[in-house]
Amino acid sequence: MALGWMWALGLYKSVVLVLFLLRRNPVQAAAAEMFGVSQATVSRRWTALLPVVEKVLARHVPDPGEASAGRVVLIDGTLIPTWDWASEGTTMFSGKHRDTGFNLRAAATLTGGLLAVSAPVPGSRHDMHAWRRSHFPEAFAEREGMGDLGYVGSGLLTPRRKPPGQERSTGDKVANHAINAHRAAVERAIAHLKDWKIFATRYRGPLTRFPLVAKTVTALAFYKKGW
């Protein structure tokens, strides 16, 4: 690749710029001012180098089946908010969260260690659809797993529903408390993912590019953990 076009920042600072955009999710004009370049330069660096960063770090993303060997797997989902793209109709709108965005699955250990992140699906899709569309059912087929009530019927251990017209039994309450206490670990794993503010604050870029963003943030999370 010819790198003459990077003279304004240089390769190193161009990569730092891409990481800054992922970490802080500023508008490109603000990033341009901070790095002393034009907004157009920021856009070009982002477009050119994001796939390079993902490709370089991809080897740090473990195989979820191997990483979860001998472990209990916790599953949870989160909404990554996006702009309300009118061209998408209601596809991106999550009734559960009352917002537009992408639905992501995360898998973690009982101690909150990240095991995997699924490919994103539109926010209008419910948890079971997202579960079935992900690689998780196959990757964790031989593992004990836990999820919330959105995963009833998935084969995961889930809290027990309240019987119609009745109160939960003491046993059900104890079991649900134990499951929810364990599931707090995957919520922590998701919270750490959202240290990358492009996950925590509203994603403003083209929706078609978000899967690459998600793969890059996932790779960075595993790289930080030393995988």
Image: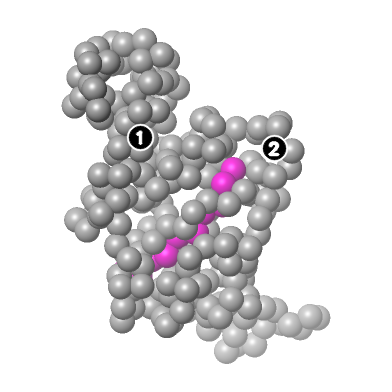
Q: Is residue 176 left or right of residue 199?
A: right
Amino acid type of the residue that numbered disc 1 sits on in the rendered structure: Leu
Name which of mark 1 and mark 2 comes first in the sequence.
Answer: 1
Image coordinates for residue 52, horizontal then vertical, percent: 30, 37
Residue at coordinates 69% horizontally, 37% vertically from top-left?
Answer: 88
For the residue carrying disc 1, how many other residues have a C-alpha within 10 Å: few (<14), some (14-19), or many (20+)?
some
Image coordinates for residue 222, horizontal then vertical, percent: 28, 54
Amino acid type of the residue that numbered disc 2 sits on in the rendered structure: Glu
- Secondary structure of the residue carrying tag 1 is helix
Vertical arrangement, residue 109 with respect to residue 144, above or below:
above
The answer to whether residue 128 is seen in the rendering is yes
Q: Is residue 137 magenta?
A: no
Quadrant (top left/top right/bottom left/bottom right) for the N terminus: top left
> Which residue ends up furthest to the front in the rendered image?
1
Residue at coordinates 40% horizontally, 28% vertically from top-left?
Answer: 47
- Secondary structure of the residue carrying tag 2 is helix
Q: Is residue 108 left or right of residue 167?
A: left
Vertical arrangement, residue 142 with respect to residue 73, above or below:
below
Quadrant (top left/top right/bottom left/bottom right) for the C terminus: bottom left
Magenta span covers which residues? 101-112
Q: Nearer the viewer, residue 46 or 202?
A: 46
Vertical arrangement, residue 216 with respect to residue 226, above or below:
above
- Residue ID for mark 2: 88
> Looking at the image, what colour scheme do you see?
one colour
Residue at coordinates 26% horizontally, 47% vertically from top-left?
Answer: 57
Q: Nearer the viewer, residue 58 or 192?
A: 58
Q: Is residue 103 magenta?
A: yes
What separation in Å lies between label 1 and label 2 (alpha carbons)?
24 Å
Q: Which mark is residue 50?
A: 1
